[in-house]
Image: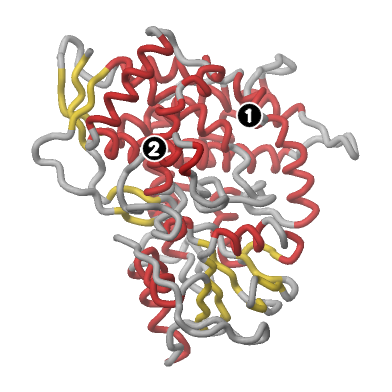
Amino acid sequence: MDTHAATSTASPPSRAGRPPGPSSRWFGLPLLSALRRDYLGFTAQLHAQYGDIAYAHVAFEHAYDVFSPELVRELLVGNPDGLKRWERGLEVFEQLMGQSVLVTEGEVWQRQRRMLQPGFSPRRVAGYAALMGRAAAKGLDAALPAGAPEGRVDMDALFTGLAMDVILRTLFSSEASDESARAVGAVQVASALAFREMFYPMTLPDWLPLPGKAAKRRALRTLKGLVAGHIAARRAAGAAEHDDLLGMLLSVRDEATGEGLSAQEVHDQCMVTFQAGHETTATALLWWSRLIAGEPEALERARREVDDVLQGATPTAADMARLPWLGATLKEAMRLYPPIPALMSRRATREIQLGEWRIPKGALVRVTPWVIQRDEHHFDQPTRFLPQRFDDPDGKAPRGASLPFGTGPRVCIGQHFAMLEMTVIAAMLLQRYELQLPGDATPCEPVMHVTLRPKDGVTLVLRRR
């Protein structure tokens, strides 16, 4: 889907007016149907037709889509006290991840974020580089059968397995197993069903004999069982300290009260870390591998940089700054195919002024990185993979035009972890293999669940170096 934005030619209305937008005949139900069929394509068309902000009346909702980087920052950074997360989204995610930092609001969220933040600081995350390197070495060395000089590789399975091993080592000091392999499929099933349920006014009980309910029950049972099993084993082991994320969750204390996380909070934070901590990273690497394999010059430059800087060594956190081109290729891949292409919608809890427009209390506000990051006003040739956008200090897009981890107080708490993990895995892949598109490769079609995945996966030819 190509997005070529066009600025609305209508003259700015008074601040009390509504932005332009599509017809809301039949209570806006045709618009809701279009969103369900092709969320990203429909939202991109809104931007192309109506400019930086569009209004639609859908059923009982007054919805505002914001596309300008400046207005997005004004909304999410400048007005955090005037927003809360969309109730329906929270209901869906709570079933998957409990009352975790992804779901909670208000004082509960502030307390959880305050307690968890030190565990995801750049300094703490840097200590996980060695674990990431060991997981990457194990998985990458087994990507081809022993003795095979080259072969076609399912990159989805490869990266998902690697990311799963990384999150198990850093969260539980464990390694991949048959149980965790089943969890991979469970996460993908849960993600697809969660996105579908977003468009329903309510979630019907999971015990009903309806399409998808049995698969959802199995997925949740698998995920909750894995997490609960690791927590129970850790508690049964007694007072032994572990320098992993679970150890941090069990030992962290609120500076204001001295209290720790409750047993349920520990479980829920593990659930969100386990699910979000591997699926988004694996998805970002999947798109990156497909894009860079199709650009031989960018690929060769990244390989040379990795060889020159690392000299065959396993990358560390300190090496990230020494691998600027590799980092640029990863950032450009996330610009074109953000792992989370649409941020969770917000509800205005008070009137908010955005530029010329007044967003009334109670309105729904949506931000879609997929559209913003493909805006030709901010990116030359926006649908092309051009890593130099992030390597040239003078050629950067406006602040906020690329937001793969979100922005404002709700910015992804694991962004440093994710960037380190992606850099380690990508560098080690290039150390070991030459990447090539197979002769029958076709363009990838993005499919939106909660994450953005290639419809038919990605297959590459890997050749040992």
Which residue of the protein is positioned furthest toward the left in this rendering? 439
Residue 388: image tag: 2
Which residue is depicted at the point 37% across and 19% down?
A: 305
Which amino acid does the dot numbered 1 rest on?
Ala
Q: Picture coordinates of residue 25 (x, y %)? A: 43, 92
Q: Which residue is mark 1?
A: 232
Q: Is residue 84 above or below residue 116?
A: below
Which residue of the protein is positioned furthest toward the bottom in this rendering? 25
Q: Can you say which quadrant of the picture contains the N terminus?
A: bottom left
Q: Can you say which quadrant of the picture contains the C terminus?
A: top left
Which mark lies nearer to you, 1 or 2?
2
Which residue is depicted at the point 25% across and 19% down?
A: 433
Which residue of the protein is positioned furthest toward the front in this rendering? 394
Q: Secondary structure at mark 2?
A: helix
Residues at marks 1 and 2, CA–CA distance in whole angstroms: 48 Å
Q: Residues within 10 Å of mark 2 (few under 14, many from 20)?
A: some
Q: Relative to residue 322, is residue 332 drawn left or right?
A: left
Which amino acid does the dot numbered 2 rest on?
Gln
Q: Relative to residue 2, is residue 234 drawn left or right?
A: right
Residue 210 shows in the view: no
Q: Depth check: give the residue in front, 452 or 41.
A: 41
Q: Is residue 76 above or below residue 46?
A: above
Q: Secondary structure at mark 1?
A: helix
Residue 440: image tag: none
Q: Relative to residue 22, is residue 129 drawn left or right?
A: right
